[in-house]
Image (cartoon, helix red, strand yellow):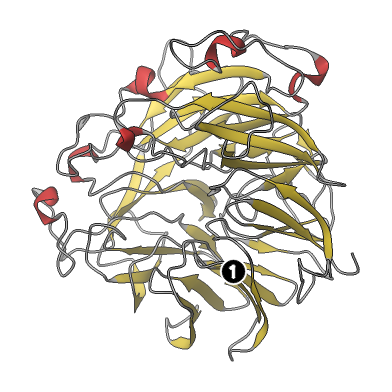
Amino acid sequence: MRAVGCGGLVLCVAGAVVRGADQVQWGKQYSRNMVSEEKGLPTSFDPATGKNIKWVAKLGNETHGTPTIGGGRVLVGTNNGEPRDVRHKGDRGVTMCFDEKDGKFLWQLVVPKIGGDVYLDWPRGGMVSPATIEGDRLYTVTNRDEVVCLDMKGMADGNDGPYRDEAAHQTPKGEGRIEVGATDADVLWMCDLEKEVGIYHHDAAHSSPLLYGDYLYVNSSNGVDNTHRKIRKPDAPSLVVIDKRTGRIVAKDEEHIGPRVFHCTWSSPALGEVNGRPLVFFCGGDGVVYAFETIKAPAEGEAAKLTKVWQFDCDPTGPKENVHKWTGNRRESPSNIKSMPVFDNGRLYVTVGGDIWWGKRQGWIKCIDPSKTGDVTKSAAIWSYEMKQTCSTVAVHDGLVYAADCGGQIHCVDAATGKGLWVHKVEGEIWASPLVADGKVYIGSCNGLFLIFAEGREKRVLSSIQLDDRISATAVAANGVVYVTTWSKMYAVANGK
C-alpha cells in the first residue's frame, strides 16, 4: 500500500515501506485523487528532439492501462500488438514491467484471450487494469477477470508459488504448451472471478484494486452480454473483498445491483476517513454511489461482511426499471459511473452520466457529503455541475476540481460551490483523467494531443504537444518523472533529460 504522507517521507502501512515519491496505485493514498506532491516537473517535452525525454518504452499497439511505479519498477497494461517474446503470438492481454531508471523491459504477464464472444474480451483491448504495488508484490486484474498477485521480480528469483501453473495459464487453449521463460511473470496466487462468484464481464475487465490492511476491494466488471440488453448474471456481486495473502474471497456486496447495471461495472473503489471511521466508496454500474464499512478480521467460525452505511443516487430521475430498453437512446437513459470516486477534504466527488456508447449525452460532477447514513440522495447532495457524458476521474486540489468529458472538454470547477471557472475544448474525445502536480495539470486526448495547463482559477495553456498515437491512459508522476502513455509508447518525461 502507498505510504501515508508526502514530501518524500517514508512511512509504514500494512507492513510495507515504500518511497514517498512512488506512485504505487491509482491516485494519492487511498483517496483515488490523482494529485502528486512531486516538484520540478516539466512544462513541455518533445519526442522529436528528445527534449525532456528520459526514456521511451515500446508497448503493444493499443494501451489503455495507466502505469504505476514502485520499488524501481514501472508497470503498465497493454496488448501483444508488438510482441516482446516471439513465443507469445497473437492477441493477448499483457502487463509489462520496466526498469524505472532506463525503461529496460524486465518481464511481462501474458494472458490469452477468452475466445468466442468478442464482447467478453474485446479484440486488441489488452489488459487495462492499473496495478497496485505493495513491497515485493503487485496486484492487478487480467483481461480474463482474474485477480492476480505477482512477484515484482518476475521469474528472476525463480517460481515462488504457491501458484505453479504459469505455463498452462499463458498457453492458449488447443495450442502447444508455452513453458515459463526468464521474462515471464511469477504468479503467486490467482482468484478467477468468473469461477468464484459467477460474474459475466463485458468488453474488458477493468479494476484498480484498492488495498487497505489485509484486504483488496475489487469491482467485478459484471455487465451486459453481446446484445447489450441482458445481464446474464444478475445475482453476481459488483464489489468483492479478497484476502491479499491468499487470494481467497472473504466478502461481497449484497446490494443486488446486477439487474440495474446499464452497461458494466467499471468503477474502482476509493476509501476515506469520515468521522473517525474508514469507509469504502463504490460506484455501481447503476449510477448509484455506495459507502461500506471496511472489513475487519472476523471471529473464528464467522464470515466477514460488507456492511452498507449509505447510498446516493447520482441520477434520481433516470429510468430504474427495465433499464436496457433505453440502450441506444441518446436523449434519455439511465446513468452509470465509469470513473473512480475521489475523496478530498471531507467530501466525495464523482463523475456520472449517460453511457459513452449507449446512453444520453449528458453527465455531471456530483459533490457528496459522505457523513450521512441511509438513503442520502437528497440530504447529502452539495452541488452538481453539468457536462457531457464522461469516463474521467476528477482531480481535486487547492479548492479546484479538474475533470474531462467525452465531448473533448476539460473543466475547472470551484470545489466549494460547483461553479464552473473555465473550459478548454479539443477535437475528439477524452478518456483519460487529469493529473495535478507541481502547479500544473496534465492530460491527454484520444486524438493524441497532450496538454499541460497552469493550475489555477484562470485558464492558461503551458504546452500543447501532438503525439503520434492515441491516448487513453492517465499521466502519472513519480520520483521527478511524468509518465505519458500513448497506445504504443510510454514516455518518461523529466526536466533536463
- Most extreme residue toward the bottom is 458
- Viewer-nearest residue: 290 or 304: 290
Residue at (49%, 18%) from the top-left corner?
248
Looking at the rendered image, the quarter that the N terminus falls into is top right
Looking at the rendered image, the quarter that the C terminus falls into is bottom right
For residue 79, above or below residue 364: above
- Most extreme residue toward the right is 496
Taking the image as drawn, is residue 342 in sight?
Answer: yes
Residue 410, given in percent of the width and then of the height, sits at 49, 77
Residue 211, given in percent of the width and then of the height, sits at 58, 37
Taking the image as drawn, is residue 253 in sight?
Answer: no
For residue 161, above or below residue 15: above
Q: Is residue 70 left or right of residue 199?
A: right
Residue 20, given in percent of the width and then of the height, sits at 80, 51
Residue at (56%, 78%) from the top-left corner?
400
Q: Secondary structure at mark 1?
A: strand
Residue at (37%, 69%) from the top-left corner?
366
Count of marks placed on residues: 1
For residue 276, above or below residue 84: below
Inspect the image, locate mark 1, and give the three-letter code of the amino acid beneath it: Ile
Q: Is residue 313 left or right of residue 73?
A: left
* Quadrant position of residue 157: top right
* Quadrant position of residue 429: bottom left
- Viewer-nearest residue: 377 or 146: 146
For residue 76, above or below residue 6: above
Residue at (82%, 55%) from the top-left corner?
479
- Viewer-nearest residue: 454 or 270: 454
- Tag 1: Cα neighbours inside 10 Å, few (<14), some, or many (≥20)? many
Residue occupied by mark 1: 443
